[in-house]
Image (cartoon, grey):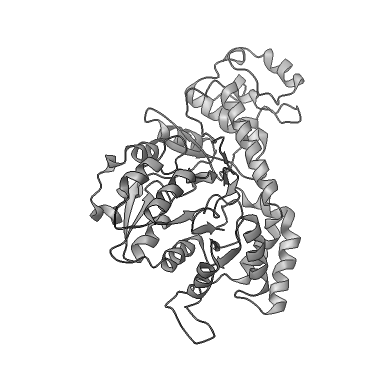
Amino acid sequence: MNPSSPSKRLACSSFGTVNSCNLDRSVPFLDLKRIHAPLRERIASALVGVCDSGAFVLGPEVERLEHSLAAYCQVSRAVACSSGSEALLLALMALGIGPGDEVIAPSFTFFATVSAVVRLGATPVFADIDPATFNVSPLEVARLVHHATKVILPVHLFGQAAEMEPILAIAARCRIAVVEDAAQAIGAEHLGRRVGCMGDIGCFSFYPTKNLGAMGDAGMLSASSPEIAEKLRLLRAHGMQPRYYHSLIGINGRMDAFQAAVLNVKFEFLENWISERSEQAETYRGLFQEFGLADVLRLPTASPRARHVWNQFVIRVPDGRRDALRQHLADRKVGTEIYYPLGLHEQACFRHLGYAPTDLPETFAAARDVLALPIFPGLTRDEQYVVVARIAEFYQTTKSRSQVAAPLFLSRSVERISSSLPEA
């Protein structure tokens, strides 16, 4: 591209100044340094406090986190654990899932959702998704329930709650437990209820990329009853209570105090970060509209019945052009990711279950056209502009300044300068 071309000069800062090289800037898919830098001193102080206390596994910091998150998630009890993956395993262990049992789960999800099922000797039954939300289809769930079904495991994918009302009705009618995989969706809601409080057990991840992320692995479970919560606490610590007396066979799934200390600092900012992510999602919508791409690509939708917390902003790229667009963006140093390139029913380790790739048509289609764009606290409007401008460049929708309206946040001075640009 010629450095003096109009598309190179379209980008501007939200302060109204023109930088002819703005479109040359790289845009990371995620930059955790922007989140942590303002909290550096507070986090360091919290970690020193753990060092001084000598309580490195569980302890006061973990208990404080459990109390805070129980209240936030609208449950009476929360049980911290070592990771989101172990949360799923512990949940199924607490419900006694094992050989001969079936668990209904979406195929379009991260591997941990279903690996926990298989690790216990149970059989995953894969359900297709709603193509608009990427969440499991309640109609599919209803179709798949039969006598061996012991758990329905909906995933609140990308930060949006699944349609829990019909799923809970199916579970109640058939006396089936519900385990919510809320790894990507802390703070999300369905009909005013927080994810993790609707089923029997909720599972959360605090992997660093999540909306509330630790500085390593960590997870949490929310429990609908004191009995389940107590069982989860036993299972996460080898089934041991009191020390060296074991009533259950559990695992080592305890959270370390350093991760809890970090999460206690960051938790205060979770709602602000969710608001920022929501604003970024709206900015993307406006930009795609202004660049004439809203009908070219399929943008993510937020259900009016739900609160979306935007862990990811995932577009769908039609006509088999997803990989080409991703390469175009990578060549221009714009970060993207594919969640997920295959449905789990297509993975080699699950081939013995006998699914053909197109047995779940919506999952099959989504895996071949989804593309996640940068969205994280600290991402600037300029950077979002670059992302969408580069996509527009791929589709050749910015042939001239007169053909594409400026984003709403451009200053009048920039509009005056840009309006005088010649055609490319």
Which residue corresponds to the image point at 58% horizontal and 64% vertical from the top-left? Answer: 78
Where residue 406 appears, x then y in whole percent? 65, 20
* Left or right: where 324 falls relative to 398: left
Which residue corresponds to the image point at 44% horizontal and 31% vertical from the top-left? Answer: 317
Where residue 316 appears, x then y in whole percent? 45, 33
Residue 373, visible in the rendered structure: yes
Q: Is residue 211 above or below residue 5?
A: below
Quarter where residue 279 is shown: top right
Front-lying residue, 176 or 342 = 176
Front-lying residue, 398 or 276 = 276
Quarter where residue 327 is shown: top left
Front-lying residue, 302 or 385 = 302
* Left or right: where 3 falls relative to 269: left
* Left or right: where 413 falls relative to 6: right
Residue 5, visible in the rendered structure: no
Q: Is residue 5 above or below residue 351?
A: above
Where residue 56 appears, x then y in whole percent? 62, 76
The N terminus appears in which quarter of the rendering? top right
Quarter where residue 416 is shown: top right
Q: Is residue 179 above or below residue 107?
A: below
Front-lying residue, 174 or 24 = 174
Q: Pick out the residue farthest to the bottom.
A: 244
The C terminus appears in which quarter of the rendering? top right
**Image mark count:** 0
Which residue corresponds to the image point at 35% horizontal and 42% vertical from the top-left? Answer: 140
